[in-house]
């Protein structure tokens, strides 16, 4: 889209607009899930100037200042959506968390921001005043926000969708290790293409689910903590796995993961019991109603220390493990 400019292209655009005597407005943000508040804000910002430029936070900066799991929408797509609004004249990418360096680079007549003056915004406003610009605050009349939308989705996800195929009466919970148990163990797996469901897993999960047991994953992901791959990579791998299981009618209710490295000594990394206890609390089940299927000593120890049962299922052993659970009524 021609409204999306690189920093250098923006330099030239600004110079031309300023030469034409037009008043430039600048604003920035992540615009992760575009909503009415954003649209109103940008429309009102445009009324304050002749040309409105929007710097969209890069994916890396959103991860840094908001939440390592955000943004939901990648930067190229967020820029594309913002550029589609009539109020917006130019869109560019902002790699820094804060707009200060871009403000000093372009010296727009107007620095426009939403909400309140935070400490960082005050510092930017000071810099804008020093070069002769002005700062304006626009408060939205909508109470919506991207975070509220995410919360609403989480709330919906927390309400189990009615599913006639799954009996809820036994209420047991099966905790599943991921790598080496459900899928082939690839060291520091981060490529969805390398997801390979192990033999017997589909059939075993279908039987467990049909007997009324709910399924959740508990997985150590030290590679995130060590920086070998990102939380986003981890999610992409899970998405692939959930899609393949979903196509066979299998529903994984939740994925618990430990993103920490061994050195961080957290309470969630198996053999610690953090994830197991959290799952039991979330699902409202007792240790007697819970069984962990895994392939390592750490899995077995986490289950034992939490008071749960466990069954070992290495490669090709998932079917027998599922049978063992069903026959012995472990859960
Ligand atoms: Zn942890």
Image (cartoon, rainbow, N blue to C red):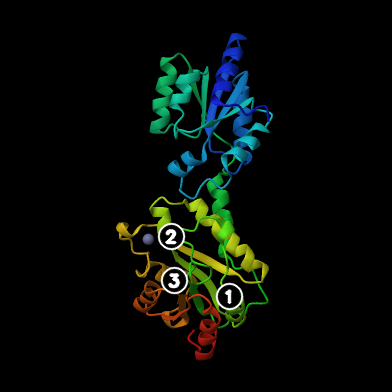
Task: Assign a secondary structure to mark 2.
Answer: loop
Q: Position of residue 23 (x, y in %)?
A: 58, 15
The quarter of the displayed image where residue 122 is located: top left
Percent x, y for residue 128?
Answer: 44, 19
- Local crowd at mark 1 within 10 Å, few (<14), some, or many (≥20)? some
Disc 1: residue Cβ within 8 A of ligand 1's nearest atom: no
Q: Residue 35: give x, y in percent of width and height.
A: 62, 42
Looking at the image, the residue that sits furthest to the bottom is 328
For mark 1, give the secondary structure.
loop
| Foreground pick, 321 / 260 | 321
Observer able to see residue 155: no
Task: Sort mark 2 into few (<14), some (14-19) or many (20+) by Cα contacts within 10 Å.
Answer: many
Left or right: where does residue 269 sit relative to residue 162?
A: left
Specify the label residue 199 is tagged with: 1
Asked whether, in this view, residue 306 is left or right of residue 56, the answer is left
Label 3 CB less than 8 angstroms from ligand 1: no
Q: Is residue 42 above or below residue 130?
A: below
| Closer to the camera in the image, 298 or 126 | 298
Residue 306: image tag: none
In whole angstroms, how far apart are the C-alphas of marks 2 and 3?
21 Å
Single out the mark in the foreground, 3 or 1.
1
Whichever of labels 2 and 3 marks the residue nearer the N terminus, that label is: 2
Q: Which residue is mark 3?
A: 281
Label 3: which secondary element? helix
**What residue is disc 2 on?**
221
Q: In the rendered structure, which disc, 1 or 2, sits on the residue that comes first in sequence?
A: 1
x, y percentage for residue 197? 58, 69
């Amino acid at each position: 889209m021609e409204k999306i400019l690189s920093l250098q292209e923006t330099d030239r655009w600004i110079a031309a607009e300023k030469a034409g005597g037009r008043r430039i407005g600048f604003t920035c943000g992540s615009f992760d899930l575009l909503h009415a508040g954003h649209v109103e804000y940008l429309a009102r910002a445009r009324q304050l100037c002749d040309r409105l430029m929007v710097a969209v936070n890069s994916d890396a900066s959103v991860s840094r200042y908001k939440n390592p799991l955000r943004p939901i929408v990648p930067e190229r797509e967020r820029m594309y959506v913002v550029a589609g609004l009539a109020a917006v004249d130019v869109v560019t990418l902002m790699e820094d968390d804060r707009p200060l360096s871009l403000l000093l680079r372009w010296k727009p007549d107007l620095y426009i921001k939403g909400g309140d003056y935070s400490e960082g915004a005050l510092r930017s406003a000071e810099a804008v005043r020093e070069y002769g610009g002005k700062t304006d605050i626009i408060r939205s009349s909508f109470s919506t926000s991207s975070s509220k939308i995410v919360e609403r989705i989480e709330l919906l996800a927390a309400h189990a969708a009615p599913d006639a195929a799954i009996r809820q009466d036994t209420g047991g919970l099966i905790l599943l290790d991921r790598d080496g148990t459900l899928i082939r163990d690839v060291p520091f797996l981060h490529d969805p293409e390398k997801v390979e469901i192990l033999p017997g897993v589909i059939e075993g999960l279908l039987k467990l689910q049909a007997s009324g047991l709910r399924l959740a994953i508990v997985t150590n992901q030290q590679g995130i903590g060590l920086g070998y791959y990102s939380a986003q990579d981890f999610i992409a791998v899970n998405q692939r796995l959930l899609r393949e299981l979903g196509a066979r009618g299998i529903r994984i209710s939740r994925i618990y993961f430990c993103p920490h490295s061994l050195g961080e000594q957290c309470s969630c990394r198996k053999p610690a019991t953090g994830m197991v206890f959290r799952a039991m609390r979330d699902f409202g089940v007792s240790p007697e109603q819970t069984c962990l299927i895994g392939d390592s000593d750490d899995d077995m120890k986490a289950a034992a220390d939490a008071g749960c049962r466990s069954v070992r299922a290495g490669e090709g052993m998932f079917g027998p493990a599922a049978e063992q659970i069903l026959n012995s009524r472990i859960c």
